Image (tube, rainbow, N blue to C red):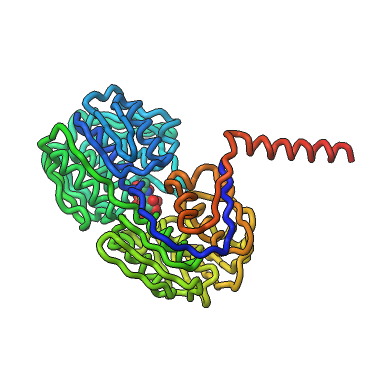
């Protein structure tokens, strides 16, 4: 359990290098075991979710060494096709190992994945894509058994451009005989980097970034060396932090093309944005005004992951902001907590209406999920006094040294780490003391 302390009111100045992308790294780690090859993967962020993926690889028999943001993975020996529930439950991306295991071992035994509770998050599209390639899949409770003596190429049509289903289909297709076409594929930058990585291992694959991906087998190579692209949601978060708090920051190692929609809304809200190659400069006087309606959509639309964070940046913006969430049913979980800072937000179904207020005041909030937690830190930067965010480890699943990075830009943020159970113990002690008192009365 972590308690993040944020003392609001400081403007942000300086430059910050954007970390490697979590959502690009995780499918690459699953992909690293598709062939008996060695991979060097660079610019991997140090995050809990990455640790979870490494633990899965190690459990399956791969050798993984980590050094200064680089992972050395030797997947020449894979000794099992089963992922225990405790490892699956750590994160959402563990489900991508299904396609990787099917490709490598012809079977996969695992359970439903964990991750942020953003809605129902079914995996029907993953399963139907794998079935189309010849996999037999059965489910008992939360356990999933997949088997395919031989995978074959298929025509796959996704009814929604699911990122995870596209990744799973791409990985399984690496071992399929013949040609696999994935239509209606997700177009996110993470899909493009997965294609580049697979191509560097000898997979004949084209089309990522568009809505049709074609995979025609592989001429496997023994090794590859690949660099993870920068994290567009972390870049968006830092940009939103500066927009809300005011100041001028320079993001380096960023890919502005990957978060143009976020930059567009910040610009509309009154920030000055300049970008050139991998550098993005954001300047804000901290006095924002509400942009026109924000609607989340699959890439290249406005990313759902940035929605809670941009909302947090606009809490004090003059006027009314309307936000429509189209991807996840449960993506406004930050709202009830943000209200405690003195905000005026109303949610009806998929619509949120946010009326900017003059001032926010620090409060103790609870992070509901990864991006919701980051949103609370951003809000805290603009609130009067201290905001405390109680977080069961969500934020460190996606942000590397977030406190240090914000402090280096001039923010006052620090984390109080409570040992496993300590926080719960403290609450229990409080409750039992209260109980004793109650009995005394
Ligand atoms: C990925 C990202 C997550 C991001 C999301 C949408 C990772 C690790 N996570 O999640 O941060 O918020 O993309 O950009 O990369 N759906 C189905 N059936 C399926 C699969 C998905 O109905 O089989 C629905 C989901 O419930 C959701 C929508 O499709 O409503 C988008 O999900 P998807 O693109 O699959 O998201 P993830 O891959 O889980």
List x then y, in percent, for residue 147. 27, 30
Please determine whether, in this image, residue 328 is positioned above or below residue 52.
below
**At 48% across and 68% down in the image, what residue appears?**
246
Count of residue discs = 0
**At 23% across and 40% down in the image, what residue appears?**
171
**At 21% across and 48% down in the image, what residue appears?**
156
Q: In terms of image quadrants, where is residue 16?
A: bottom left
Q: Quadrant of the N terminus?
A: top right
| Camera-side residue of 255 and 193 | 255
Please determine whether, in this image, residue 95 is positioned above or below residue 238.
above
Please determine whether, in this image, residue 208 is positioned above or below residue 434.
below
**At 33% across and 57% down in the image, what residue appears?**
252
Q: Is residue 288 left or right of residue 69?
A: right
What residue occupies the far right of the structure in this picture?
A: 441
Q: Quadrant of the C terminus?
A: top right
What residue occupies the far top of the structure in this picture?
A: 79
List x then y, in percent, for residue 9. 57, 64
Q: In terms of image quadrants, where is residue 33?
A: top left
Q: Is residue 118 visible?
A: no
Q: Is residue 250 visible?
A: yes
| Camera-side residue of 184 and 242 | 242
List x then y, in percent, for residue 175. 17, 35
List x then y, in percent, for residue 332. 51, 58
């Amino acid at each position: 359990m972590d308690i993040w302390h944020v003392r609001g009111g400081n403007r942000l100045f300086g430059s910050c290098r954007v970390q490697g992308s979590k959502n690009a790294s995780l499918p690459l780690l699953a992909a690293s075991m598709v062939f008996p090859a060695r991979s060097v993967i660079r610019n991997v962020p140090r995050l809990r979710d990455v640790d979870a993926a490494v633990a899965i690889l190690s459990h399956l028999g791969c050798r993984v060494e980590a050094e200064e943001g680089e992972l050395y993975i030797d997947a020449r020996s894979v000794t099992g096709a089963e992922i225990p529930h405790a490892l699956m439950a750590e994160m959402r991306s563990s489900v991508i190992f299904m396609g990787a295991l099917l490709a490598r071992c012809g079977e996969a035994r695992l359970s439903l994945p964990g991750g942020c509770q953003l809605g129902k998050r079914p995996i029907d599209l993953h399963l139907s894509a794998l079935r189309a390639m010849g996999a037999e899949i059965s489910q008992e409770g939360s356990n999933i058994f997949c088997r395919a003596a031989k995978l074959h190429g298929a025509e796959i049509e996704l009814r929604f451009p699911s990122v995870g289903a596209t990744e799973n289909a791409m990985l399984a297709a690496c071992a399929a005989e013949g040609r696999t076409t994935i239509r209606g594929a997700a177009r996110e930058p993470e899909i493009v980097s997965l294609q580049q990585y697979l191509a560097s291992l000898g997979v004949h694959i084209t089309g990522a970034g568009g809505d049709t991906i074609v995979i025609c087998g592989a001429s496997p190579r023994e090794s590859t060396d690949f660099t993870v692209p920068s994290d567009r949601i972390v870049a968006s978060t830092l940009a939103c932090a500066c927009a809300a708090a005011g100041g001028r920051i320079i993001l380096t190692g960023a890919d502005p093309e990957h978060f143009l929609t976020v930059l567009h809304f910040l610009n509309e809200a009154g920030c000055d944005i300049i970008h050139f190659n991998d550098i993005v400069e954001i300047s804000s006087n901290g006095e924002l005004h509400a942009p026109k309606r924000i609607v989340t959509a699959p890439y290249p639309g406005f990313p759902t992951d940035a929605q809670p964070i941009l909302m947090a940046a606009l809490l004090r913006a003059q006027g009314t902001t309307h936000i429509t969430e189209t991807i996840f049913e449960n993506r406004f979980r930050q709202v009830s907590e943000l209200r405690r800072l003195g905000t005026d937000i109303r949610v009806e179904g998929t619509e949120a209406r946010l009326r900017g207020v003059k001032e926010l005041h620090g409060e103790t909030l609870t992070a509901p999920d990864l991006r919701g937690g980051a949103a609370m830190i951003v809000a805290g930067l603009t609130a009067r006094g201290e905001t405390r965010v109680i977080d069961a480890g969500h934020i460190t699943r996606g942000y590397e040294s977030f406190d240090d990075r914000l402090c280096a830009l001039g923010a006052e943020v620090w984390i109080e780490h409570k040992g496993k159970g300590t926080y719960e113990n403290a609450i229990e002690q409080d409750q039992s003391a209260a109980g004793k008192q109650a009995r005394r009365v």
